Image (tube, rainbow, N blue to C red):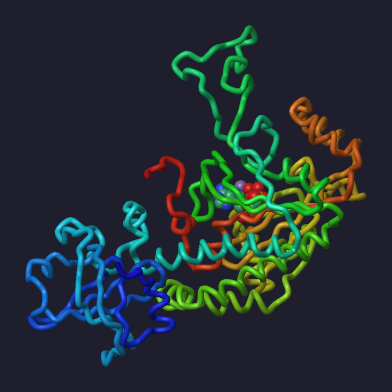
Amino acid sequence: MMKRSKIKELLKSPPFGKEVLVKGWVRTKRGNRNIAFIALNDGSTINNIQIVVDTASFDDNLLKEISTGACIAVEGMLAESPGKGQNVEIQARKIEIYGKCDAETYPLQKKGHSMEFLREIAHLRFRTNTFGAVFRIRHAMAFAIHKYFNDRGFYYLHTPIITGSDCEGAGEMFHVTTLDLKNVPIDTDGEIDFSNDFFGKETNLTVSGQLEGELGALSLGEIYTFGPTFRAENSNTPRHLAEFWMIEPEMAFYDLNDNMDLAEDFLKYLIAYALENCTEDLQFLNDMIDRDLLGRLRFVLDNEFVRINYTEAVNILTTSGRKWEFPVGFGRDLQAEHERYLVETHFKRPVIITDYPKEIKAFYMKQNDDGRTVRAMDVLFPGIGEIIGGSQREEDYDKLKNRITELKLPEKDLWWYLDTRKFGTAPHSGFGLGFERMILFMTGMSNIRDVIPFPRTPKNAEF
Ligand code: ATP
Ligand code: MN
């Protein structure tokens, strides 16, 4: 048996004149009575390899069964192609059909399906050029993230997916339970009695690995998490998923400036990595999906991010002369329209906003001396809005405890978190990058549902 070659390798350094074996899915078949041309794709690259079939040497019935979507194995000689549009072709000697594909019912016959339609056939959309490109880039970014941190001595820390603390503070949570939903036990106070539940207490799916990540950083030094997170927020936007992946580095001895420096360097590294390693897929997306994609990636790579504090941001917005759908003013959270104005209209480059009012940020953020603001940072990107949220953490035991009391958070669930501030506390910082928001930016796709293989959103958990 000959060893299978990947199409990517054959196109990169073609062993002309050699017999090769390729396996893949038929993208198109055309030709006439004497000769057929099959464009074959095996997922290793966006490019197809051309198979040339001398119809006289093959059984008619076999050739008929080779239609768009079919899976075949082809043995033949690799030759220089005289045809336009490719320089390599395989002159088929032997063809085996692994899987026929019924032309009548195969949903991917026509070109130019809408993204909405393709979402309904998410099990097959991998076979389109667009989704092939998106998911190869997604892979490359996941790999680059691990490489970035590993090269810098960060440790990959696995934080729990099922969590017993409901004060991670980042949004609505999904309950995890084995209680009989038709017969939920109620205690004497009329509350649900979780003592008989699987874990003997109320549990949820995590909205962030940060609190546990901090525990790791306060001993290992620099850690990062990279895992799924879940938010039961009913936000039907092109930028929110109920299940998404987050990268959360957490570093001892970093102040907010160090944190911002890391975030900017990290994002630029990922862009540079994609430009270097995903050239063909990016070019395709630039040509077919978003004509500004490559220009925007290079622009963000080449320019320093603007750093301003929240108060300055509010001033810019209130003096902009714009009419806002959501009001602007100190103490109000910035909405997507405000974030995008600052990035896309005012500064025309990525912006990091720091020092938000404490009321609109989480309890664990380091309190500034002004008593009003905290050492938070949000990184805002063109076309995306918030791509990173982070902060320097409050390392002072008393200040942290007071804030927990002020906000009436359940201290009994946070004893372990408070312990770190009691036993050798240290200044530390961290942030969370939404992986899919990064992939949105990197691919020029416009809906977050199209950069994760199987999106989970309100009223949708198909596949
Ligand atoms: P937003 O205001 O956009 O809802 P957030 O303030 O809730 O975001 P954080 O809690 O700071 O976000 O989460 C860190 C990062 O995770 C965000 O910067 C974003 O990139 C990403 N993120 C947050 N919520 C979602 C979601 N529902 N779907 C996909 N990514 C998300
Ligand atoms: Mn949110």
Q: In the image shown, does 9 or 215 lie closer to the viewer? A: 9
- Residue furthest to the top in view is 188
Q: In the image shown, does 74 or 405 lie closer to the viewer? A: 74
- Residue furthest to the front in view is 1
Q: Which of the 4 quarters of the picture holds residue 337?
A: bottom right
For the point 90% across and 37% down, the residue is: 423
For the point 73% across and 45% down, the residue is: 213
Q: Position of residue 345 (x, y in %)?
A: 63, 71
Q: Position of residue 188 (x, y in %)?
A: 63, 7
Q: Quadrant of the N terminus?
A: bottom left
Q: Which of the 4 quarters of the picture holds residue 20?
A: bottom left
- Residue 172 visible from this viewpoint: no
Taking the image as shown, residue 33 lies to the left or right of residue 38, namely left
Q: Position of residue 105 (x, y in %)?
A: 18, 56
Taking the image as shown, residue 263 lies to the left or right of residue 37, namely right
Q: Which of the 4 quarters of the picture holds residue 380?
A: bottom right
Examine the rendered structure and indicate whether residue 371 appears above or below residue 39: above
Q: Quadrant of the C terminus?
A: top left
Taking the image as shown, residue 228 lies to the left or right of residue 152, namely left
For the point 60% across and 34% down, the residue is: 162
Total number of numbered labels? 0
- Residue 118 visible from this viewpoint: yes
- Residue furthest to the bottom in view is 82
For the point 8% across and 67% down, the residue is: 61
Examine the rendered structure and indicate whether residue 305 appears above or below residue 50: above
Taking the image as shown, residue 291 lies to the left or right of residue 416, namely left
